[in-house]
Amino acid sequence: MKKIIITGANGQLGRAINHFYQNSKEFVCVNTDVAELNICDITAVLKFVEEVKPYAIVNCAAHTGVDACETDVENAFKINAIGPRNLAIAASKNQAKIIHISTDYVFPGDGDRPYTEFDTPGPKGVYGASKLAGENFVKEFSKDYMIIRTAWLYGEGKNFVKTMLRLAETNESVRVVGDQYGSPTSAKELARFIGYLLPTDNYGLFHGTCEGQCSWAEFATEIFTQAKKTTKVEAITTAEYPTPAVRPAYSVLENTMLKMTTDFQFADWKDAIAEYIEDGIL
Ligand SMILES: NC(=O)c1ccc[n+]([C@@H]2O[C@H](COP(=O)([O-])OP(=O)(O)OC[C@H]3O[C@@H](n4cnc5c(N)ncnc54)[C@H](OP(=O)(O)O)[C@@H]3O)[C@@H](O)[C@H]2O)c1
């Protein structure tokens, strides 16, 4: 069996990747989270990768607290930039592939069309800046890399879908930002794409999001409709919901590289919500 080291395996994407490979006869996941392998520790990373001798490393570990990153700057860069750098060095030394996950928040979001892989990033906050630094380190220190930028991820763990469904239990209406646009993506769909790409030699930078786009308010409305909740959504402006981190207004990603180089298709964002609710991982 070919070994795949999963870092941050307890997170949303790490769990979804484990589900994807659970019946695989070709690949087996070697799961690690911060307790077993702190990706910020270069010595520990090199030792672990040398021992396991994996076919690939999939880096699902990250500091994903977008607002917290604004004040926890050193940790944000340690986990989101130095961590992937360490993994890239270890992958390169051990002839392993590396798949690294990045974000739509590397873009400023002030345009009016979806971003492709050929657009120039320009993050607005610490989270996006640290993730962009991570991408650059992976490009600098490894050769056989696949960097996948995703967005608005939900799976097993803390996420927007669960928050909305929890609020629906006790609220007749919720106020949700209606002027920030993105592409909600289920961890299951992203894991399916990772599983598709990983055995190939199709290296480089990819956008990987579900098809279609919406605002957070439209996302919430769709969740309530599909979960048969009567809770109403009141769309508010970003100015009415100030947060420590400035978020991009329009960070929709076009999966251009994927479409130009593969026949893989992500599900539509609404269909992915339906599947998520059907899977019952709420
Ligand atoms: N969530 C989103 O909406 C979103 C959007 C775009 C891109 N992404 C990217 O997608 C990827 C997966 O996100 P996710 O939502 O699955 O993240 P997640 O649920 O927050 O999981 C991240 C995991 O990494 C662990 N971790 C933190 N620091 C670590 C360290 N130093 N060493 C090893 N593990 C560490 C976390 O442990 P603790 O929980 O104990 O800290 C957690 O188990 C990330 O690269 C993220 O930046 C996410």
Image (cartoon, grey):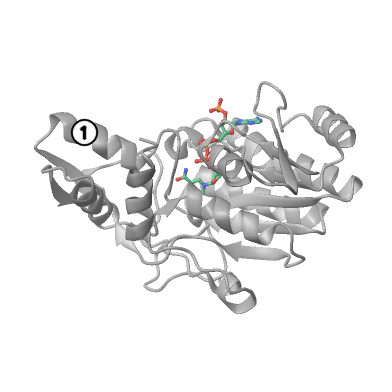
Q: Of 76 and 263, which appears nearest the observer?
A: 263
The residue nearer to you, when weighing 237 against 264, is 264
Q: Nearer the viewer, residue 101 or 106?
A: 101
For the residue pair 194 and 140, the one nearer the viewer reads as: 194
- Residue in the image at 58% along x and 36% along y: 76
Q: Position of residue 176 (x, y in %)?
A: 22, 46
Quadrant position of the C terminus in the picture? top left
Q: Is residue 114 above or below residue 271?
A: below
Residue extending farthest to the bottom is: 260
Which image quarter holds the N terminus?
top right
Residue at image x 83%, y 49%? 96
Kind of residue indicated by mark 1:
Leu
The quadrant holding residue 245 is top left
Task: Specify whether residue 226 is in view.
Answer: yes
Q: Mark 1 points at which residue?
A: 167
Q: In which quarter of the image is ligand 1?
A: top right
